[in-house]
Image (tube, rainbow, N blue to C red):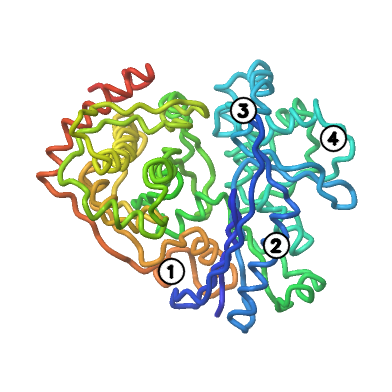
């Protein structure tokens, strides 16, 4: 048995293949660049497709055996527009592109943000697909030639199999998908001027879209029996690869940090709405879920590295910093929203704050303070969920590049006051897709069985009682700083 995942991101695509015991057989990766110019951020869909086929081809040649199934996960929101000959029309607009912000106000004026949230599980903010499509419709001449509109999951699937299927979890990132009916919202589409037939068929994650087209198999050296499955929004595929299930919370620690969790039923309460949390179908069966996001996490560390220690090789930076990191709280309180701020006050444009600096503050303390700020932001969201009866987050698993830092994991355990389990492999996104494709191929009875076979536990980090107590005062200082930043914090955390 060989199954795997094709994980399409903003700056690159990777393919990871596994056997039935969860052993990684190979990892392949290709980078690509998005363009940025004056607030416009775009991806070249043709380039993404080419790189995706290359990593899949390299993986197939590396294992030199037939691949049974591959799942596809992808970034959200960004659309690929095709004409009747399947040629790409224009570059794909990324979520943080300013185009669509004015259109967000128009669609909000028509339906109201609360009504849109009730239907789609997300609040209008200018980042979602339908807002970007409204901008394209009003500003790009090629709109008249649109024949298909896809996101990157169904775009790759369509090009590999000839069939257009999109997972519920990724469809929910369009702000045009009714998350309860699990169907496209006709009224929102009509207002935006988007024809429903342009869009792919929404299905559960783990649905087989078909086998690879003969010409694709021949060109890239793939076995003609290779089955392609819907994966989903990359965050939810990553969560599945981290062991997501009822009662288990997954901390995805990468460029940003999240806490992903399942819910008993769709929750579109006032607390969810006020905190700008999403309520969406996940890649885990027919379940619903949500997550909090701290957009600046690994990105904060990279910023610090690049401005403070550009002379140190990147491969040596983390071990260099953590070798002399001080014990106990750093004493530096940081608002981590250096570029974008996370829940419960999500903003695409924000500024960070570093306070508590003295003449005795060392770069090592600032470095630790940055890691502490992410952990405190996660705790603030955890406390919000608990206070408003949304969910008690426990049994935390951590995946992603940040989970390889023992120092950071211990800081999170101490500040959250929770045990955190890491995994042997941090390729959780691809593992999640492999789990879905393994179930789809019939190798496993369900997701839980596949997780038990493919996911291997790593190190368990227990909170240190003394450190947790010392961090309480620092956490209060953090919350007060965040209250000064946003009125939302004055209501949601004060007990």
Q: Earlier in the sequence, mark 3 or mark 1?
A: 3
Q: Which residue is mark 1?
A: 449
- Mark 3 or 1: the one toward you: 3
**Residue positioned 32% across, 66% down in the render:** 457
Residue marked by disc 3? 126
How far apart marks 1 and 2 lie (CA) works out to 22 Å
Residue found 48% across the figure and 55% down from its top: 238
Contact between marks 1 and 2 (CB within 8 A): the answer is no
Q: Is residue 259 visible?
A: no
Q: Is residue 202 left or right of residue 274?
A: right
Q: Is residue 366 left or right of residue 453?
A: left
Quadrant of the frame with the C terminus? top left
Q: Which residue is mark 4?
A: 143
Q: Secondary structure at mark 3?
A: loop
Find disc 2 in the rendering and name its residue.
Answer: 209
The label on residue 244 is none
């Amino acid at each position: 048995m060989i199954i795997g995942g094709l994980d399409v991101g903003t700056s690159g695509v990777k393919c990871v293949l596994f056997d039935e015991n969860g052993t990684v057989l190979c990892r392949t990766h290709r980078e690509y660049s998005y363009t940025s110019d004056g607030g416009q951020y775009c991806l070249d869909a043709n380039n993404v497709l080419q790189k995706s086929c290359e990593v899949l081809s390299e993986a197939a040649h590396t294992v030199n055996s037939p691949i049974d199934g591959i799942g596809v996960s992808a970034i959200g929101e960004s659309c690929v527009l095709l004409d009747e000959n399947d040629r790409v029309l224009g570059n794909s607009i990324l979520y943080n592109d300013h185009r669509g912000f004015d259109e967000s106000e128009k669609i909000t004026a028509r339906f109201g943000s609360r009504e849109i949230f009730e239907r789609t599980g997300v609040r209008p903010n200018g980042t979602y697909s339908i807002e970007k499509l409204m901008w394209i419709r009003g500003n790009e001449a090629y709109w008249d030639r649109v024949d298909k509109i896809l996101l990157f999951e169904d775009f790759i699937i369509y090009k590999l199999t000839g069939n257009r299927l999109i997972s519920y979890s990724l469809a929910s990132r369009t702000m045009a998908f009714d998350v309860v009916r699990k169907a496209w919202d006709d009224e929102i589409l009509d207002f935006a001027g988007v024809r429903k037939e342009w869009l792919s068929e929404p299905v559960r994650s783990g649905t087989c879209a078909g086998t690879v087209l003969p010409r694709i198999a021949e060109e890239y050296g793939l076995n003609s029996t290779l089955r392609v499955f819907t994966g989903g929004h990359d965050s939810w595929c990553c969560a599945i690869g981290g062991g997501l299930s009822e009662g288990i919370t997954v901390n995805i620690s990468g460029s940003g940090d999240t806490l992903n969790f399942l819910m008993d039923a769709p929750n579109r309460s006032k607390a969810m709405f006020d905190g700008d949390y999403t309520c969406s179908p996940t890649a885990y069966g027919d379940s619903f879920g949500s997550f909090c996001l701290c957009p600046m996490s690994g990105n904060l560390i990279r910023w610090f590295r690049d401005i403070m220690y550009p002379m140190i090789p990147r491969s040596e930076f983390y071990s260099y910093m953590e070798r002399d990191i001080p014990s106990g709280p750093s004493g530096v309180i940081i608002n981590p929203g250096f570029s974008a701020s996370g829940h419960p006050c999500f903003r695409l444009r924000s500024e960070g704050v570093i306070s508590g600096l003295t003449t005795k503050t060392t770069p090592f303390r600032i470095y630790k303070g940055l890691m502490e700020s992410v952990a405190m932001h996660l705790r603030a969201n955890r406390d919000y969920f608990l206070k408003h009866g949304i969910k008690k987050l426990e049994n935390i698993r951590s995946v992603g590049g940040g989970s390889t830092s023992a120092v950071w994991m211990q800081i999170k355990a101490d500040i959250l006051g929770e045990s955190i389990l890491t995994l042997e492999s941090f390729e959780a996104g691809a593992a999640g897709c492999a789990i879905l494709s393994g179930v789809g191929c019939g190798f496993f009875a369900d997701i839980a069985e596949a997780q038990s076979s493919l996911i291997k536990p790593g190190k368990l980090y227990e909170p240190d009682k003394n450190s947790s107590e010392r961090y309480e005062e620092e956490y209060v200082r953090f919350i007060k700083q965040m209250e000064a930043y946003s009125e939302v914090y004055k209501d949601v955390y004060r007990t």
